[in-house]
Amino acid sequence: MLRPPGTGNARLQQTGIGVLDYELAGEMAASLGNAGKRAEESLAKLAAHGGGEAERNDLVREAADAVYAYFIQRELCGLKRHDDIVRQMAIPRAVLARLGAR
């Protein structure tokens, strides 16, 4: 079992800032996971689209909104670089262009 430095065999007190930090970290992780899932789902819908241009434009907008929300959530968690995510999720240029990427 891992223990934070300086705790020895004593149990950590479950009060104040330690509890709050733990809860905040859990909420941040859950929010990041949810935002990533929404981005993946919207990108999958866009990739599977085979219909008209108007519907595709709506899907591109939806995907851009979801990816933007995911990027913001990542930045709030301290993750500033998105290059690997762009490659891993295969985010299309049309979506990146709506985000202002070049």
Image (cartoon, grey):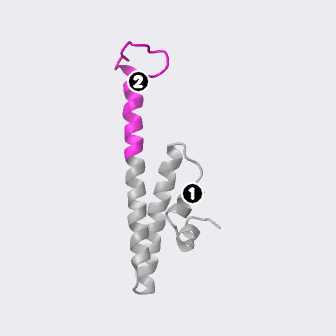
Q: Residue at x 38, y 26 (%)?
A: 1
Q: Which residue is mark 2?
A: 18
Residue furthest toward the front? 1
Depth-wise, is mark 1 or mark 2 nearer the camera? 1
Q: Residue at x 41, y 55 (%)?
A: 35
Q: Reply yes or no: does residue 6 show up in magenta.
A: yes
Residue type at mark 2 is Gly
Q: Pick whichever, 4 or 65, lies toward us.
A: 4
Q: Which residue is mark 1?
A: 84
Left or right of 80 in this view: 58 = left
Q: Position of residue 90 (x, y in %)?
A: 51, 67
Q: Reply yes or no: does residue 77 show up in magenta.
A: no
The boundaries of the magenta stretch are 1-30
Left or right of 86 in this view: 46 = left
Q: Residue at x 35, y 19 (%)?
A: 15
Q: Position of residue 38 (x, y in %)?
A: 38, 60
Structural distance between the alpha carbons of marks 1 and 2? 32 Å
Above or below residue 16? Residue 61 is: below
First in sequence, mark 1 or 2: give its number: 2
Q: Position of residue 17 (x, y in %)?
A: 42, 23
Q: Residue at x 50, y 44 (%)?
A: 76
Q: Pick whichever, 78 or 90, lies toward us.
A: 90
Please, what secondary structure does the residue beneath circle 2 have?
helix
Residue type at mark 1 is Asp
Q: Quadrant of residue 41?
A: bottom left
Above or below residue 89? Residue 79 is: above
